[in-house]
Amino acid sequence: MNDRLHPTATRLSPIELEARYGAHNYHPLPVVLTRGEGVWLRDTEGRRYLDMMSAYSAVSFGHGHPELVAALTEQASRLAVTSRAFHTDRLGPFLERLCTLTGMDRALPMNSGAEAVETALKAARKWGYKVKRIPDGQARIVVAAGNFAGRTTTIVGFSSEAQYRDGFGPFAPGFDSVPFGDVAALEAAIGEHTCAVLLEPIQGEAGIVVPPPGYLRAARELCTRRNVLLICDEIQTGLGRTGRRLAVDHEEVVPDGLTLGKALGGGLLPVSAFLAREDVMAQFTPGDHGSTFGGNPLAAAVGLAALDLLEREQLAERAAAMGERLIGALKALGHPAVAEVRGRGLLVGVELAPDFASARAVCEALMAEGVLTKDTHGTVVRLAPPLIVDAPQIDFAVAAFARALKACGG
Ligand SMILES: *Cc1c(COP(=O)(O)O)cnc(C)c1O
């Protein structure tokens, strides 16, 4: 390395370099990771950690899955990026698999989750104007309080989280927010200019909030009756995470639009998609919408391999079984510091008692016990390991959790 160009590189630690040269938009735990294999991570000191966080569910297949790495390297050396100006031999098979797996008619590939949600918003509005005949510029979309759908200016504009919005306005109009899980409020918010309802089947970033049983089914019936699209954001809950392929499968709901991301990239690449029924996706014509990297052959090859793996290894079923074990064991601790254990499959949140230590402090104590995860919303510890996790690893995590509570004074 040229020391004149990188004068501090030899003096500052990786953490110090991030602090010195990076934007301070994250507050990571003080661990520097260098390797990952399956459910395990290793740091620069050679310590080993169980990954109970999976990069917010992006690493559902575990770190460095040999089959996914093989798909990545093989495709990378053959053909990686072409743009959508041309066809490739990889995109079609990926889209077909996405549609057959989810029961949707068509898929539009993007990269990040936020881009998939933006695509859904565009499709919904255009459908509203062209099919539902909403007057130009008047389309409205109903969202739920506590939503998380990414960080673009439009998306944070309909967030109920003050910090996500503060200083980033003005925001796009046309969104109505209702309490999550409340069917009557949803019904009341739908007006004649409403084109869509956008919901997460379980709110992940809000702290693993599971709506009352029947909520999604009721939302489906309501949207059908009022000629409004039901769009489900399954970027975090989809692809086996909650114990079914999609979280909407728990209530046998078929949405009109669906967003996937995170695990779709096999933990190797950002790969997302907006999927929809025919007349919704038909709103896009050449030139309407696009992405330089969306649907590139490298992403398509890895995404296809990830979907293959999900099915072949029956990871949704595994998530259901391991999630039951995790939730059962956490509840069985009967610890007074645990106010609630909630979640579905391997998307689990532990709500700490209000007078107990912060979730951040518990995560730091967990780190000392060889388990990595992140707090969400101050009081919730997220537990969402790769779906390949096994029973002894779940038991290890729960034992570590009990010790971490003790270390925090519990
Ligand atoms: C993470 C997430 C997103 C945004 O995905 P990015 O890849 O970070 O843009 C959108 N919706 C939900 C439900 C998510 O959990």
Image (cartoon, rainbow, N blue to C red):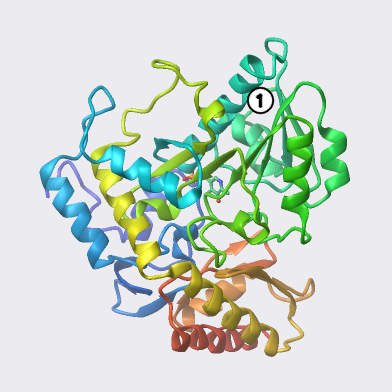
Point 86% across, 42% down: residue:
185
Task: Give the secondary structure at mark 1.
Answer: loop
Looking at the picture, which amino acid does disc 1 mark? Phe
State the residue in front, 252 or 65: 252
Q: Is residue 114 left or right of residue 18?
A: right
State the residue in front, 323 or 275: 275
Point 22% across, 25% down: residue:
86
Q: Position of residue 293 (x, y in %)?
A: 31, 33
Q: Position of residue 197 (x, y in %)?
A: 70, 36
State the residue in front, 144 or 234: 234
Q: Is residue 232 visible?
A: yes
Point 60% across, 57% down: residue:
249
Q: Which quadrant does the C terminus fall into? A: bottom right
Point 29% across, 38% down: residue:
91
Total numbered labels = 1
Q: Residue furthest top?
A: 136
Q: Residues within 10 Å of mark 1 (few under 14, many from 20)?
A: few
**Is ligand 1 closer than 8 angstroms to the Cβ of mark 1?**
no
Q: Is residue 410 left or right of residue 121?
A: right
The answer to whether residue 363 is above or below residue 191 is below
Q: Is residue 2 visible?
A: no
Q: Position of residue 250 (x, y in %)?
A: 64, 61
Quarter where residue 47 is shown = bottom left
Q: Position of residue 367 (x, y in %)?
A: 48, 76
The answer to whether residue 312 is above or below residue 100 is below
- The residue to which callout 1 is attached is 171
Q: Is residue 281 left or right of residue 217?
A: left
